[in-house]
Amino acid sequence: MTSILEQRSQIGVDVLDGLEKKFGISFSDEYKSFLINTNGGKPSPKRFVTLDKKVESMVVRFFSAGTNEEESLEVEYEEYVASGAIPSDFIPIAYDPAGNRVLLCVGGEGRESIYYWSVDEEPEEFSCSRKYMRKISNGFNEFFDGLF
């Protein structure tokens, strides 16, 4: 069973509702529950593999909500989604040791699925496409429960 270390301060549904409104997205119920219970942190165990088995990596930390800290959903949204680096139907929820991101699909095809985005494969100018993304799971709980 996966546990979360170094959790951030607790948040309520109101914080998540505010972020959804601000970002114009809707988090999956599974992911909302995770944030309300932990508000991010370091998982143990932490390894995962993409569905195509081409990438194995680990989660360093899940981003927190409502903190505006460096490792927060707010900062990640501004840096990668609002800037146009990744499509607007994704939001970074975690990162690996190389700085690549774990993404939650929040709209369109694959909604609620979890993806691995290989930032280091991207050209210098981000492509704002799914080209460097690989699917990890069909939902947050499947991803979280599958960490090894």
Image (tube, rainbow, N blue to C red):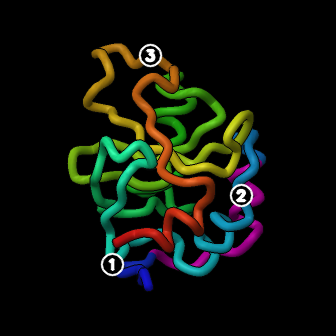
Residue 127 has which mark?
3
Element at badge 2?
loop
Range of magenta residues: 8-20
Q: Which residue type carries mark 1?
A: Ser
* Relative depth, front residue between 109 and 106: 109
Left or right of 90 on screen, residue 67 = left
Which residue is pictured at 34% across the width and 72% down the height?
148
Q: Which residue type carries mark 3?
A: Ser
Question: Is 28 situated above or below 24?
Answer: below
Q: Are marks 1 and 2 in contact (CB under 8 Å)?
A: no
| Percent coordinates x, y for residue 130 in the rendering | 51, 26
Picture quadrant of residue 16: bottom right
Left or right of 37 on screen, residue 97 = left
Cα distance, mark 1 to mark 3?
32 Å
Query: Considering only order in the chain, which callout, 2 or 1, is on the residue closer to the N terminus?
Result: 2
Q: Is residue 74 visible?
A: no
| Percent coordinates x, y for residue 3 in the rendering | 42, 83
Element at badge 3?
loop
Cα distance, mark 1 to mark 2?
22 Å
Q: Quadrant of the N terminus?
A: bottom left
Q: Is residue 34 within the magenta segment?
A: no
Residue 44 has which mark?
1
Q: How many marks?
A: 3
Residue beneath label 2, please?
Answer: 28
Query: Considering only order in the chain, which callout, 2 or 3, is on the residue closer to the N terminus?
Result: 2
| Percent coordinates x, y for residue 6 in the rendering | 36, 79
Question: Is 11 situated above or below 92?
Answer: below
Which residue is pictured at 28% across the width and 54% down the height?
57
User: Mark 1, residues whose alpha carbon is within 10 Å: few (<14), some, or many (≥20)?
Assistant: some
Q: Which residue type carries mark 2?
A: Ser
